[in-house]
Image (spheres, rainbow, N blue to C red):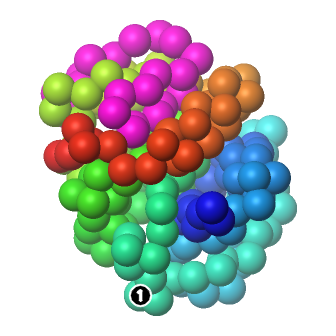
Amino acid sequence: MTKKVAILATNGFEESELKSPKEHLEQQGWTADIVSLKSGKIKSWADGNWGKEYDVNKTLDEVSSKDYHALVLPGGVINPDLLRREEKAISFVKDFFDEKKPVAAICHGPQILVNADVLEGRNVTSFFSVKEDLINAGATWTDEEVVVDNGLVTSRNPDDLPAFNKKMVEEIKEGKHELQSR
């Protein structure tokens, strides 16, 4: 069955953490839309500097979580910090949890989950510098390349992308997870 996945990102996303999952999802024959705050292009962060620009497929004003089977949250230091300030982005994320759909977040991406208030009692990992934020939001943090908890997939950094991509696809293939909640 064809799946449709939203990748929520804005300027300052870690390029590999958007590009690699997007390509992996498309290799499954699925659609992977870059969803952002505004239309046009968003600029990546790569190797300590601004990188390539990517086309935005849809804005948050144009979509609903009901349009998608799953959500991917790439990291980067700037990207999650900008997204977590936007109520539309937070509501979009919360809706995936309410609908029990898979969500995959890597590196600094889980910071958005803090603001969405969906981490209480969940097992996660992330880039080490946001560990305390996740713990303070009620999560149990472990230093592993990928952690899966009832449809929530998290990883630490770009080195973990092969494991992250594999588990993300497994969870999306499984579909809704009854214990995925907020």
Tell me if mark 1 has few (under 14), some (14-19) or many (20+) residues whose alpha carbon lies within 10 angstroms of its own: few
Q: Nearer the viewer, residue 22 or 129?
A: 22
Q: At 58% across and 31% down in the image, what residue appears?
A: 167
Task: Mark yes or no: residue 134 visible.
Answer: yes
Helix, strand or loop at mark 1: helix
Badge 1 amino acid = Asp
Q: Position of residue 74 (x, y in %)?
A: 57, 48
Q: Is residue 73 left or right of residue 100?
A: right
Q: Position of residue 41 (x, y in %)?
A: 71, 78
Q: Quadrant of residue 111?
A: top left
Q: As displayed, is residue 153 above or below residue 40?
A: above
**How many marks on residues?**
1
Q: Is residue 122 found inside the magenta-colored segment of the image?
A: no
Q: Is residue 146 found inside the magenta-colored segment of the image?
A: yes
Q: At 80% across and 39% down in the image, what residue appears?
A: 47
Q: Position of residue 27 (x, y in %)?
A: 81, 52
Q: Is residue 164 left or right of residue 110?
A: right
Quarter that holds the N terminus: bottom right
Task: Mark yes or no: residue 114 visible.
Answer: no
Q: Is residue 135 left or right of residue 157?
A: left
Task: Write the start and end of the magenta stretch as one range.
Answer: 135-155
Q: At 61% across and 42% down in the image, what residue appears?
A: 169
Q: Position of residue 60 (x, y in %)?
A: 44, 80
Q: Nearer the viewer, residue 177 or 141?
A: 177
Residue assigned mark 1: 61
Q: At 83% across and 62% down in the image, what residue appears?
A: 52
Q: As displayed, is residue 115 above or below residue 124?
A: below
**Name of the residue lying farthest toward the front:** 1
Q: Nearer the viewer, residue 103 or 116?
A: 103
